């Protein structure tokens, strides 16, 4: 059944307050619900319907009199009085049997919940939609030492605890946790002087991995006060780490629940990248308190209203905490790796989708990351001050609302006087715009002429021009900037912009900071790219120039059999040697485009990508870099050594990042000697894992792999890395076999989403391995997707997207992938989640 945005209609009743009494038992938890309903004057007449799935209804009553509702697998309908009434229900549920990890479930003996988007209906009968907001009072009964819910604790006794959340919220923000947990405490005083108690709750044994998360939480609270003027609004803020979790984390009011991989950290067990990600996710969930919770979404089509904005806010936070330039480049790498393939394939959908069958399938890179790009463009167009004005108005006007994208754009229109009707296309039009550009210079006047065009996407054959903020700078032939960064506002399909009074033809630096999420098509000469690589003041474009040269070089190697572009390698060497540059930036400069990105590029140029040829070219190029720099590399390793005590800050992480890239090049020359030395001496996970990765690539890993396993066999999160790396870093011809062998181990706990993804997600990331000609990778993955779907549809459906590029490849591979998708589609009893995904993939 498909649900449409255009069919929105308000719920017929308002909920004054919700009282829940939850009596915990693994196989028979009782949930007693009391709700005061009153008619909603703004809603059309309708039957009284409450969502409810997988519930056993024990009793229902209206104003104290028992009633017999009509119950279906989706919910119940009931005859109700005309005016206000008290609704009561008792249901029974079995959290221990809940392997879908949605609703109330158990993870390693603790009770926890995940309700977004539509999980609350697996806990009790309720109007489970985000525009129904209510205050909640929750009583939890059970022997567990710790019993938590949203809001503030109000009372507790032997075997029970009560919580009250004074802020009206939709059911998707409900949470409950109970278990024998221990806390890492903290404290924060808000800008108006209110003391807030903070806690990170973990299983005993993990207390030592909470300090970093706690500091990140405090930094986030402070930052949101300083930058957005947003203050926290309860007496307590709790975070809980859960081992079995379908996603990264969840912003439940006052009780954030995290995948343990996204909150637990220590130098010995976490990489620098883990630390940075944890800091960002803690910030993201915390920021949702205002962008998501205080102002929520009217319906799930508006998901980007909270997610795009909150991703944008967390990226601003990371930029402030670390290097803004490095963050921007990393975000663009991620956007191109995850969002572009989505937007350019069968799963393409607008930032605000207009229909869905299963909303869980729309927590996508398009809604999140492209949604954040759209806000970045808006901010660039209106400027910092007007952005701040619009946001103030948004918080003022919509606090307590379930809002829409129209509401969001209206505050910008009112705060700035701009007409955003064309800009709004970013929310409705799917696909990645392509932007081409020509230049002209005569008599001191320089003209840039742009043309934009968005290829058709499923359901949208015709595309209209988008508003594109194009940040441009101009350099003179000496490398000095003659026109600093200027934002050109393109609105037409084709449009020219002129710059006057130039004494010579400038070199343009176009789309600085990646100011719009487009594919820029510009075949400028390699020496112009090398010039920008050497001189551009915009870090993003400096990186992009080098990336373009790498792409062109790999393209020629793959399609023409050319050798590596030594001129690029030599130009890059100047950057790598420049110790005035941030090592993190230099590490990004040294990385090559991924093989998946190269496949996408070849496909875009009308060449059928051959994964083996792409792999071979990438290897040849890396070997050439290693040989050319054989003297420089050991020298750089020395410079990147960190002698201070470990800190996961930007400065030290940058050094280790560059050190690890350098190590991977050196491994091509020394067979792994330096990597083995680094592995043996490592006292932190970044160095240990970086070395292990090199050893696996070199096929010299046996000893290190065994040592790593012996050291970490009792740490689930570290063992996830051990599983993942073997599949990701192994040579393509061994990847599927290795993944398959790992699935036979007793500790391949496939019902744990982290472990499943460690093996299967890594297989899909090993481009040439997944796409091996014999089809073994495809088969293995499909086998496991079929198996997992019976237990956990959400994680299965999400992973189906690894097939989204299937139409790019040669006819043999296409036929094999199609057959696997069809095999999944034909499974009797396939979940709604996976059915929708494979149907879209096959369409
Ligand atoms: N709102 C959560 C976040 O962005 C993610 C929830 C994902 N839910 C889902 N059903 N996929 O932090
Ligand atoms: Zn979010």
Image: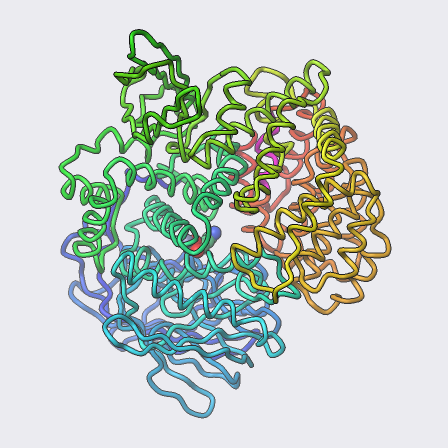
Instruction: Specify whether residue 795 is in view.
Output: yes
Q: Tell me which corner region of the image, top left, top right, bottom left or bottom right, holds residue 733.
A: top right
Residue 98 in the figure: left or right of residue 402: right
Residue at position x 34%, y 74% in the image? 151
Residue 207 painted magenta:
no
243 over 162 or under it: above or below: above
747 over 674 or under it: above or below: below
Instruction: Specify whether residue 35 is in view.
Output: no
Residue 805 painted magenta:
yes
Front residue (pair 253, 107): 253
Front residue (pair 710, 624): 624
Residue at position x 42%, y 28% in the image? 518
Q: Tell me which corner region of the image, top left, top right, bottom left or bottom right, holds residue 557.
A: top right
347 over 527 or under it: above or below: below
Percent position of residue 27, x then y: 57, 73
Residue 805 in the figure: left or right of residue 164: right
Q: Magenta: predominant secondary structure element? A: helix
Percent position of residue 657, x then y: 61, 49
Residue 740 in the figure: left or right of residue 306: right
The quarter of the picture where the N terminus appears is top left
Residue at position x 54%, y 79% in the image? 181
Front residue (pair 645, 76): 645
> Bounds of the magenta span?
800-807
131 over 665 or under it: above or below: below
Ligand 1 rendered quadrant = bottom left
Percent position of residue 349, x then y: 42, 34
Q: Tell me which corner region of the image, top left, top right, bottom left or bottom right, holds residue 570.
A: top right
Colour mapping: rainbow
Percent position of residue 782, x then y: 68, 41
């Amino acid at each position: 059944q498909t649900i449409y945005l255009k069919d929105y209609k308000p719920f017929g009743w308002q909920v004054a307050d919700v009282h829940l009494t939850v009596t915990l038992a693994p196989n028979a938890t009782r949930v007693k619900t009391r709700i005061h309903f009153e008619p909603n004057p703004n809603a059309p007449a309708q039957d009284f319907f409450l969502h409810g799935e997988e519930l056993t209804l024990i009793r229902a009553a209206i104003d104290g009199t028992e009633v017999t509702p009509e119950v279906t697998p989706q919910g119940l309908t009931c005859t109700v009085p005309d005016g206000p009434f008290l609704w009561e229900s008792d249901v029974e549920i079995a959290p221990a049997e809940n392997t879908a990890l949605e609703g109330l479930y158990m993870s390693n003996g603790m009770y926890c919940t995940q309700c977004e988007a539509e999980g609350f209906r697996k806990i009790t009968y309720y109007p489970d939609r985000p525009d129904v907001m209510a205050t909640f009072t929750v009583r939890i009964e059970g022997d567990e030492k710790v019993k938590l819910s949203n809001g503030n604790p109000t009372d507790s006794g032997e075997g029970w605890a009560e919580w009250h959340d004074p802020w009206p919220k939709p059911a998707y923000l409900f949470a409950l946790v109970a278990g024998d947990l221990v806390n890492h405490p903290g404290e924060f005083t808000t800008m108006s002087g209110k003391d807030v108690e903070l806690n990170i709750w973990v299983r005993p044994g993990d207390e030592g991995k909470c300090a970093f998360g706690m500091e990140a939480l405090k930094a986030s609270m402070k930052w949101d006060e300083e930058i957005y003027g947003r203050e926290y609004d309860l007496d307590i803020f709790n975070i809980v780490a859960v081992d079995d979790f379908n996603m990264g984390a969840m912003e439940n009011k006052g009780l954030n629940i995290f995948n343990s991989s996204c909150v637990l950290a220590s130098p010995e067990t976490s990489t620098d990248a883990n630390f940075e990600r944890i800091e960002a996710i803690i910030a993201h969930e915390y920021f949702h308190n205002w962008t998501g919770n205080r102002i929520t979404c009217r319906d799930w089509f508006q998901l980007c209203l909270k997610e795009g904005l909150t991703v944008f806010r967390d990226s601003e936070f990371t930029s402030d905490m670390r290097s803004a330039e490095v963050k921007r480049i990393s975000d663009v790498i991620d956007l191109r790796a995850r969002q572009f393939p989505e937007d350019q394939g069968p799963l393409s959908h607008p930032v605000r989708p207009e229909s869905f069958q299963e909303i869980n399938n729309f927590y996508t890179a398009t809604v999140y990351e492209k949604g954040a790009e759209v806000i970045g463009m808006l901010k660039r167009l209106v400027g910092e001050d007007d952005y701040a004005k619009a946001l103030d108005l948004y918080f003022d006007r919509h606090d307590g609302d379930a809002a829409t994208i129209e509401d969001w754009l209206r505050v910008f229109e009112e705060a700035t006087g701009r007409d955003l009707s064309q800009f709004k296309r970013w929310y409705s039009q799917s696909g990645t715009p392509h932007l081409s550009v020509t230049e002209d210079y005569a008599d001191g006047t320089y003209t840039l002429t742009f043309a934009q065009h968005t290829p058709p996407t499923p359901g949208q054959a015709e595309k209209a021009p988008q508003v594109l903020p194009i940040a441009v700078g101009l350099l003179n032939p000496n490398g000095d900037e003659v026109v600093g960064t200027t934002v050109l506002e393109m609105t037409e399909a084709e449009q020219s912009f002129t710059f006057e009074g130039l004494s010579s033809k400038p070199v343009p630096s176009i789309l600085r900071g990646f100011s719009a999420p487009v594919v820029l098509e510009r075949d400028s000469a390699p020496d112009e790219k090398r010039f920008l690589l050497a001189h551009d003041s915009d870090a993003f474009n400096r990186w992009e120039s080098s990336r373009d040269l790498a792409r062109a070089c790999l393209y020629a190697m793959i399609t023409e059999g050319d050798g590596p572009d030594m001129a690029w390698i030599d130009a890059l060497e100047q950057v790598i040697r420049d110790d005035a540059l941030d090592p993190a930036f230099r590490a990004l400069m040294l990385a090559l485009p991924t093989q998946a990105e190269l496949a996408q590029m070849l496909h875009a140029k009308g060449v059928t990508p051959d994964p083996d040829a792409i792999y071979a070219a990438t290897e040849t190029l890396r070997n050439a870099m290693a040989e050319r720099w054989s003297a420089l590399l050991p020298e750089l390793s020395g410079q990147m050594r960190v002698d201070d005590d470990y800190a996961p800050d930007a400065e030290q992480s940058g050094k280790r990042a560059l050190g690890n890239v350098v190590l991977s090049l050196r491994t091509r020359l020394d067979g792994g000697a330096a990597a083995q030395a680094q592995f043996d001496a490592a006292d932190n996970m970044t160095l240990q894992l970086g070395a292990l990765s090199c050893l696996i690539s070199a096929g010299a890993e046996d000893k290190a792999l065994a040592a790593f396993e012996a050291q970490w066999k009792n740490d689930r999160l570290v063992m996830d890395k051990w599983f993942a790396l073997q599949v990701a870093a192994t040579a393509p011809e061994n990847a599927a076999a290795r993944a398959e062998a790992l699935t036979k181990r007793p500790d391949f706990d496939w019902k744990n989403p982290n472990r499943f993804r460690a093996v299967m997600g890594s297989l899909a990331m090993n481009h040439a391995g997944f796409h091996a000609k014999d089809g073994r990778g495809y088969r293995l993955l499909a086998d496991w997707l079929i198996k997992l779907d019976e237990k956990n549809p959400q994680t299965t459906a999400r992973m189906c997207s690894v097939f989204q590029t299937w139409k790019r490849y040669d006819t043999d591979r296409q036929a094999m992938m199609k057959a696997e998708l069809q095999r999944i589609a034909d499974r009797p009893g396939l979940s709604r989640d996976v059915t929708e995904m494979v149907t879209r993939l096959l369409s």
